[in-house]
Image (cartoon, rainbow, N blue to C red):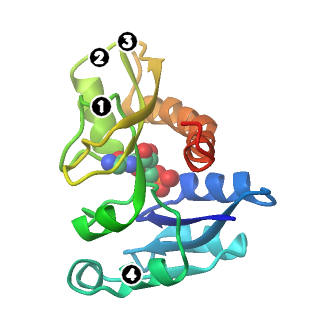
Amino acid sequence: MKKIAILASGSGSNAENIIRFFQNHPAILVDSVWTNKANAFVLERAERLNIEAHVFTKNELALTNHLLNEFKSRKIDLIVLAGFLLLLPQKFVREFQVVNIHPALLPSYGGKGMYGEHVHSAVIANKEKQSGITIHLVDEVYDHGKILFQASCTIDPMDTPQDLAGKIHELEMEHFPRVIERLLLGSA
Ligand code: GAR
């Protein structure tokens, strides 16, 4: 079995979708969910889906090896960032394969502060005609690693950031688990 650890900071709709996709999968298992927010909705989703979940602090992540050692002892094959809003320290990228989803077409609309609604508001403010999702490996530079997959959607002139968020959400639900599956099973 290949094992996934999911890191998430917010609602966790991607985390839930990934967990559901891999329930009863013959070769891939979601081992656990990890969040830096004690009140993140992802914790409720994990509990409902019977997946072990843990809360950690920013300092624990950056200044100790607690998480790193947990992932090593659990023999995690892939760390999935699913709406994880802290910078992942370099030590993780050196030890593990890490994949992230970004709600725009990188290299546009990436970088620090560009997450969730902020991305969609910036895209709409610039009157872009399309946006999309980028699924990429995480390296030591923010929003920079090898792009594994992109999918785009069109933006209508009257679309609000919320409308765009809905379109992006659909793309994320459709593609993220499948890209993870291909990555882990060696065909990405
Ligand atoms: C997702 O849209 C994801 O692409 C985005 O956060 C959202 C999390 O939603 N990630 C980033 O913006 C990373 N820079 P969720 O908690 O419902 O999965």
Type of residue at label 4?
Leu
SS category of the residue bearing label 2: loop
For label 1, the residue is 106
How far apart marks 2 and 4 lie (CA) works out to: 39 Å
Q: Quadrant of the N terminus?
A: bottom right
Query: Which numbered disc, 2 or 4, marks the residue that appears first in the sequence?
Result: 4
- The residue indicated by pointer 4 is 67
* Amino acid type of the residue tagged 3 in the rendering: Pro
| Mark drawn on residue 128 | 2
- Residue 185 in picture, x, y percent from top left: 63, 47
Please give the name of the residue rendered at 63% of the width and 35% of the height, measured from the top-left corner. Answer: 174
Mark positioned earlier in the residue sequence (1 or 4) = 4
Q: Which amino acid does label 2 sit on?
A: Glu
Q: Which of marks 1 and 4 is in front?
A: 4
Residue sitting nearer the eye, 121 or 168: 168
- Identify residue type, mark 1: Leu
**Alpha-carbon distance for marks 3 and 4?**
45 Å
Q: Residue 74 location in percent, x, y?
A: 55, 80
Q: Nearer the viewer, mark 3 or mark 2?
A: 2
Q: Closer to the camera: disc 2 or disc 4?
A: 4
* Residue at numbered disc 3: 157
